Image (cartoon, rainbow, N blue to C red):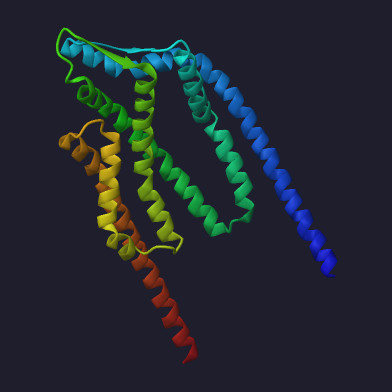
Amino acid sequence: MARRKDKERRGSLRSHLRELRIRLSWSAGFLVVGTVVGWFLFDPVFSFLQEPLKNVADERGIDASANFTTVVSAFDLRIQLSIFLGVIITSPVWLWNTWAFIAPGLKEKEKRYAVGFMASALPLFLAGTTLAWASLPGFVVALIGFTPEGSTNVINAADYVLFAIRILLIFGFAFVMPVILVLLNFAGIATGKGILKSWRAAVLIIAIIAALATPVAEPMTMLLMMVPLMMLFFGAVGIAMLNDKRRERKQEKLLTSDEFELD
């Protein structure tokens, strides 16, 4: 009997590992294809990322442009940006494979939470990246604003592109964090009051994110970055508290019904 259970466990583990290997292979294959597509999209994407720099340089009368400083720097940047674009392009595939591998082990309630998380996280991530793109010219102004008129600001192309991508990702993931807090609350891991108690740590983390996303120590830019993040954080606290009250009312009803049945 024990041997049979042992064999069943080993068989189950092998099947899980086989499924994991298959899904990783499919994801990796699509990632390679996406990277190849990203290679051909490099030129329009690079031009798109340069637009804020060109606009600011024209408005301020500064000769500023993205340059490649070494023989291989253009190739290195193309590879890095192609992989990044490949990850973005193929995200529906590897996200679906991740979900398909995890979902069978989840309960129905947990599946609803996961679907709700994905449905709300994607729009917030896009909202964060949109705000980042709108703020990017301000960051560029802060970077090249000290360049004297009539002089040239030689900017490393790789540094500029990676800086722009970093800004987009930091803003995007920062906007998703409140959704994670709400998900933890709905899963019963954290309470609204518990999340609220950590508001000082949240303010500190938000300030650090704003400082990382802001190229220079410019208080106004940091404040503009912090305000929407603080609103999202306290909005998440409010939703968590409402959910806690709903849960308490539900428990009270259950207790009342149990007492009534006993009587």
In the picture shown, does residue 38 fall above or below 183? above
Quadrant that contains the N terminus: bottom right
50, above or below 128, in the image: above
| Residue 140 relative to residue 120: left or right | left
- Picture coordinates of residue 8, whole percent (x, y): 79, 60
In percent of width and height, residue 95 lies at 55, 39
Residue situated in front as seen by the camera: 53 or 113: 53
Where is residue 91 drawn, in percent x and y?
Answer: 53, 33
128 or 243, nearer to the observer: 128
Name the image quarter holding residue 126. top left
**Residue at the (59%, 28%) spot, across then down:** 31
Q: Name the outermost residue toward the front.
A: 70
> What residue do we see at 16% from left, 13% from top?
60
Does 70 sit left or right of 60 as displayed?
A: right
The residue shown at (21%, 22%) is 141
> Left or right of 72: which side holds 238?
left
Residue in front for this viewpoint, 38 or 256 = 38
Quadrant of the rendered image containing residue 23: top right
- Report the front residue among 20 and 107: 20
